[in-house]
Image (spheres, grey):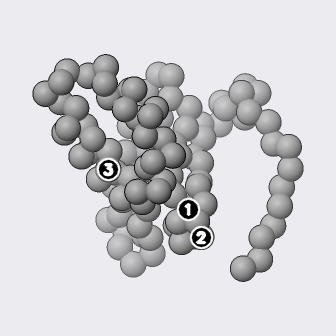
Amino acid sequence: MARYMSLFENDFDEVISRQPADEIERLRLFFYFIADRYAQSAVEDQNIYTLASAYSDIVFRTEGIDGIIYLSVQYHHDGISYALKPSVLDGNKITLNGVAKLFI
């Protein structure tokens, strides 16, 4: 997970640095906790899915947030997955240029 977090560390630091100084470490711990839950398989423990799903619902109700990026559990953290609001595609904020199927 550290490799994944390092991809977005500068952006993450920029966002949380806008918060009160006494809250920054708690926010960092919270987001590492959430990232860890997204990175776990929910096949054996539905509570993991419930927590990630509830957090996603809250995030997607937040104005200005269009998606969540998280580690690909299916591909053993060797990829990144995206959860996007339908409006991202409907509003042409992003376009699909191609599709590939990977056999492992």
Disc 1 versus disc 3: distance between alpha carbons? 16 Å
For badge 1, the amino acid type reads Ser
Where does residue 84 sit, x and y in percent of width and height? 60, 41
Q: Position of residue 97 (x, y in %)?
A: 85, 43
Q: Residue at x 35, y 73 (%)?
A: 45
Helix, strand or loop at label 2? It is loop
What's the distance in space between the residues labelled 3 and 2, CA to CA?
20 Å
Q: Secondary structure at mark 1?
A: loop
Q: Which mark is residue 32?
A: 3
Q: Residue at x 55, y 62 (%)?
A: 72
Q: Quadrant of the C terminus?
A: bottom right
Residue at the extreme right: 98
Residue ID for mark 2: 75
> In the image, what residue occupies the spot 44% across and 34% down?
10
Name the residue type under label 3.
Answer: Tyr
Q: Which dot marks residue 72?
A: 1
Say whether residue 45 is left or right of residue 30: right
